[in-house]
Amino acid sequence: MKFDMTLARLMAEPFLVEPNFANAVLDNILAFREGNPSDTHTELANESVTYQLVGDVAVIGVDGPMYKKDMSGMCMSVASYDQLIQAQDKAEKDRMVSKILYRVDTPGGSVAGLEEFRQRIEDSSKEVLVYAENTMASAGMYAFTPAKKIYANESTVLGSIGVIVMYEEPKSKTFAIVSSSAPNKYCNIESEECKSKIQNRLDQYENIFLSKLESAFPDKSREQIVQDFDRGGTIFAQEAKNLGYVTDIMPFQTLLRSLVEDETLSSEKTANTQLQAENIDKGFSMTVEELQAQLTDANTTIEAKTTEIDGLTATIEGLNKVSAVAKMAVTVGMQLGASQENILAAMEEDSTEKAENLLYKSVMSGGAITTGEDLSDEDKAKATAKAEDDALMEYAQKHKVRG
């Protein structure tokens, strides 16, 4: 009885799944009910969703159809959306993880629970990558296309974009009586009206499906997507790559090796990552990268301030030089009795030596500034003596002193 209820629920539920697989599953379920398990079923020992940390890459394996809850041990093994969300959340919280890589082999899955899982990938704070291995169809396309990059191997098939619901052909006539206000509560699948309603519902699901693919591939129109994937069919990975849906084609281990080498091959980086996690656990809020960024900013600020200080120092040195020249010009000019004009001219010189030389020359030449070679000490002595004689003469004349 419990199995029959489960079967009824499964068969009434819309699926995004590859139709050949849907037929095989239906046959398998019916055979299981009759006590004749089909050879098409292989028990996966609850390993439809696996989690492995390789370097700083979290590898999440998805093997088989996807459903909202775990059905392992009943008639088939499925990758439940609950398990997938738990794996995604685990990778999100792990400070050692920088990339999340899904290794996917799925014919699709149920609509129920699908959007919540897809949203987890779309909103991930870490770089999410997908490797399509063997098959990534229907709900697989819906769930994993928000990933930053999609990889595949040569034999992988992708597509089966559409919605399907399966019905078992009734062995005997079934009658149902519904309440007066709910005439549409029961749908007789043999009637055209019922088929039309179901078709309309599936078309609405398909519309949502296509809108998600449009957001994942913004350069593609809805019509292009439908045509590219053969109107519900599947295509090989090489064609999908040529059409822009797959980033690259390579073996899985080659991809994983490149990701690990890019991020964690260096033992120094691994040690730094470990140290970063330990520091956070101890209460240090900043990561190594954040500290390095702050150090770089601090060095840049120090260099700018050093340049500014060098400029101010040069300005001060220049002002000190100007001050020294002016002081020299006034002191020597007053000692030699130079004119105000000559003292001001001396202040314009760029060294105390030149200012002093100019003032001595002005005294020796009777007040006029002359050019030429610098004066010798003997010439300066003569100029000083002349200035003193001129000063005495001026004093004598002023006070009418006679010799």
Image (cartoon, rainbow, N blue to C red):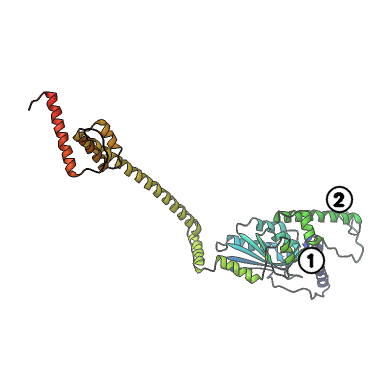
Q: 377 or 277: which is nearer to us?
A: 377
Q: Which residue is drawn at 27% across and 31% down?
A: 341
- The answer to whether any part of residue 375 appears in the image is yes
Q: What's under tag 2, amino acid-wise?
A: Ala
Q: Please state, as top left, top right, bottom left or bottom right, where the C terminus lies in the image.
A: top left
Please give left or right for residue 219 compared with residue 343 in the image: right
Q: What's under tag 1, amino acid-wise?
A: Lys
**Relative image position of residue 265 (x, y in whole percent):** 54, 69
**Relative image position of residue 127 (x, y in whole percent):** 61, 60
Q: Residues within 10 Å of mark 1 (few under 14, many from 20)?
A: few
**Relative image position of residue 311 (x, y in whole percent):** 38, 46
Q: Which mark identifies residue 182?
A: 2
Q: Please state, as top left, top right, bottom left or bottom right, where the N terminus lies in the image.
A: bottom right
When the figure is inspected, residue 147 is found, relative to residue 357, above or below; the finding is below
Q: Name the secondary structure under disc 1.
A: helix
Give me the C-alpha separation between circle 2 and circle 1: 27 Å
User: Mark 2 or mark 1, which has the lower sequence index?
Assistant: 1
Q: 256 or 339: which is nearer to us?
A: 339
Q: How crowded is mark 2: few (under 14 residues within 10 Å), some or many (20 or more)?
A: few
Q: 312 or 147: which is nearer to us?
A: 312
Q: Which mark identifies residue 2?
A: 1
When the figure is inspected, residue 332 is found, relative to residue 95, above or below; the finding is above
Please give left or right for residue 152 compared with residue 39 in the image: left
Q: Are marks 2 and 1 in contact (CB under 8 Å)?
A: no
Q: Which residue is drawn at 86% across and 65% down?
A: 168
Q: Which mark identifies residue 103?
A: none
- The answer to whether any part of residue 287 appears in the image is no
